[in-house]
Every structure is written in C-alpha cells, then in structure tokens.
Image (cartoon, rainbow, N blue to C red):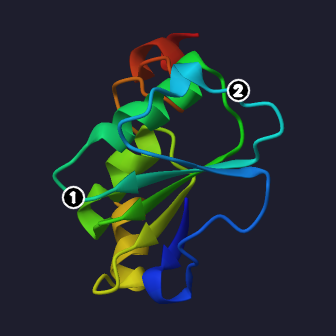
C-alpha cells in the first residue's frame, strides 16, 4: 500500500480518470470504464462506509485500478484498509509515516480471505 501524508496530497482529483466517490454512493451503479483511481472518503475514522465501497469495487466489481483512502485516515486502520482493497492511503496530518509503514508490515498474512486474497489461508496452503 502506498502511504501519502496529508500535507503532500491534493484534495481534488487532478485528472479525468480519477473519480471521487461520496461515501453514501453505491459503487454498483458506477460505470468504471476509463477510471484509473477512485478516491473514497472517511469523514470520521468511525465511519466505515468507504470500507464497504472498496470491498465492493475490488471483490464484486473487479476494479483493478487504484483505490485511495482520504479524510480521517489513522495508522491503526491501515491493515483493514489493505485487506478491503485500498491501494493508497492519505494519512491524517498528525499521523507518522514511519509508524504507518511498521503497522502495515506487522502481519505477513491472514487466515481469513479478504477483498485482495479471496481464498482463506487453509485453502491456499492445501492447493
């Protein structure tokens, strides 16, 4: 996962192939042709709707482009963001990039399946 500090990120999409999706929008109603990146917003770290959107985009809709988490993104959210299909995260301004990178490296694999690796570990190891 690519980590971006809030001080270096732009808040608005800079090109036509970037889509900023409101967190109350249904990704299943989108036309994803020509979209390279989708920005999903966390208005508060307690609002998890963007997690559901990312999962839908990756697992059900097969979106292969970048999915960026923006807004109130904290270091402790990063493992779940990665498992739900986010490829980039713009960290809140008070979050430390070094701590964030360590958090991502903490767990090498997971037993359960997720948006990125659908098959659970026990199936992957016996195949």
**Where does residue 45 sit, x and y in percent of width and height?**
21, 58
Residue 108 in view? no
User: Considering only vertical position in the picture, is 21 above or below 120?
Assistant: below
* Horizontal arrangement in the rendering, residue 109 relative to residue 11 (left or right): left
Tell me if mark 1 has few (under 14), some (14-19) or many (20+) residues whose alpha carbon lies within 10 angstroms of its own. few
Residue appearing at x 52%, y 28% in the figure: 27
Q: Where does label 2 land, which residue?
A: 31
Badge nearest the viewer, 2 or 1: 2
Position of the C terminus, as image quadrant, is top right
- In terms of image quadrants, where is residue 57? top right
Residue picked out by circle 1: 45
Residue 18's x, y, as percent? 70, 53
What SS does tag 1 mark? loop
Q: Position of residue 50 (x, y in %)?
A: 37, 42
At 78% from the left and 51% from the top, the residue drawn is: 17
Residue located at (40% from left, 54% from top): 41
Residue 86 or residue 39, whichever sits in front: 39
Quadrant, the N terminus: bottom right
Compared to 118, does 76 lie above or below? below
The quadrant in which residue 61 appears is top right
> Percent from the top left, x then y, of residue 80?
33, 46
């Amino acid at each position: 996962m690519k980590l971006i500090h809030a001080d270096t990120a732009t808040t608005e999409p800079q090109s036509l192939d970037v889509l900023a999706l409101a967190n109350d929008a249904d990704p299943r109603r989108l036309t994803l042709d020509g979209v390279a990146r989708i920005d999903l917003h966390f208005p508060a770290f307690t609002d998890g709707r963007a997690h559901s959107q990312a999962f839908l985009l990756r697992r059900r809709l097969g979106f292969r482009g970048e999915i960026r988490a923006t807004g109130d993104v904290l270091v402790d959210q990063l493992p779940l963001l990665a498992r739900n299909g986010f490829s980039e995260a713009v960290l809140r301004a008070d979050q430390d990039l070094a701590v964030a990178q360590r958090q991502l490296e903490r767990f090498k694999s997971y037993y359960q399946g997720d948006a990125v690796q659908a098959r659970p570990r026990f199936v992957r190891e016996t195949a």
